[in-house]
Amino acid sequence: MKQKTFIISFLLFSLIISLLSSCGSKENNGAEASGNENTTQVLYDYFVENGNYINSEGTPAVMTAAGFIEIMNKKDILVIDLRNAEEFAAGHIKGAINVQPADVPDFFRNHIDAPSFDRIVFLCNRGQLSAYVNGIMRLLGNTNTWSVRYGLSSLKAEFAKGWDSVIGNHAEATADTANHPFPQQSSLPAISVQGDDGYQIASIQARNLLSQESNQFLIEYAEVMKNPSDYFIVAYVSPDHYSKSGHLPGAVRYAPTKSLSIDKQLLTLPADKPIVVYCFNGHHSAYATAYLRMLGYDARSILYGANRFMHGFLEKNDQGTPRYWSAAQKNDIPFTTGQSVAPETGKSTTKVKSAAGGC
């Protein structure tokens, strides 16, 4: 009898421990979809419910240099320079604040009242890092953030030399003129994050991605051409450019602002192979890359875009547009030196406590 009682007690004790462990596990796991494809679906649904930015006519949020120069001195404009502290101190736009990409989410959350600015403009040397960072911040619901086409290269002569030295024409990059079909549909990648809802998952993904080195989301054209078959190449361009100019070997055309949703062609992208995206100058593709990486795809944007390997075609067929790098994109505005200065205190800092003049 005693043995029977002991066995029953032991079984009850084991059951209680099991239940407690199960409760503890559920609490620690955060979102019920954490660490699998369902988490990605929760995140995707959040993006759709909040405007489906990458598949909207509002993308990409890229200003021309002329448009930026016109508004840059207004009190409700905040300029965030993403370069390192040494580069920033050597010369930057007056009033700009120096914030590293990894610190941007915290900066928005704890150091500024972001909605009180008319525009928050990200800047970097060539415009592609700032486009990528802004793509992520837009996905977090910031509707007043922008990047500048060609970045500081379109604002200061010394930076323009970088673009001057890389534009080119490579016949091997445009020899393929075939219209490659979309692959069969697969599934969304699985992401391993914890969060109670889509916004929390997005916030964690954003912090993770913005802490990575740029070679995780940008790639050189020459690196791709070493073995194009190692990548799934996305030509993020109009049908005319895809068919008339030729495209990178094996590239499949995905329509900008339309194709990267589940009811279109998103699920035709491979979840198990590196994806390379290119557009005309690397800006729109940087936004698309930010979106794809948020969803767990191993995506990269080609540095300098098609300007890197088919500049002559763009120059001939896109006169009057900012799609190709030319003298028309170059400006040389005054810079100042030193550290960031908070407009309200006058003290050197990389943090701003409130909007300068905001609403």
Image (cartoon, helix red, strand yellow):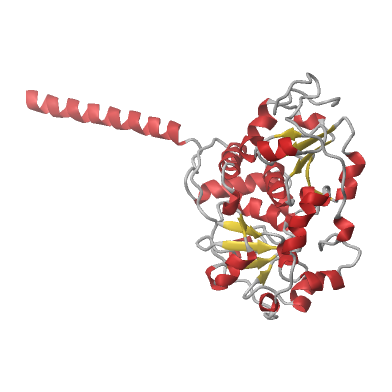
Q: Position of residue 58 (x, y in %)?
A: 80, 50
- Above-or-below relation of 148 to 104: below
Q: Is residue 155 left or right of residue 129?
A: right
Choose top left, top right, bottom left or bottom right for residue 91: top right
Residue 334 falls in image quadrant: top right
Image quadrant where one finds the C terminus: top right
Q: Left of 225 or right of it: where is 59?
A: right
Q: Nearer the viewer, residue 317 or 124?
A: 124
Residue 200, image x, y percentages? 59, 36
Name which residue lies at 56% across and 67% down: 231
Q: Residue at x 63, y 71 (%)?
A: 182
Q: Residue at x 86, y 56 (%)?
A: 329
Q: Is residue 220 above or below residue 153?
A: below
Q: Is residue 40 above or below residue 119?
A: below
Q: Is residue 61 visible?
A: no
Q: Position of residue 54 (x, y in %)?
A: 72, 52
Q: Is residue 345 visible?
A: yes
The percent position of residue 92, horizontal first and vertical second, equals 78, 38
Q: Residue at x 66, y 78 (%)?
A: 172
Determine whether, in the image, residue 50 is placed left or right of residue 325: left
The N terminus sits in image quarter: top left
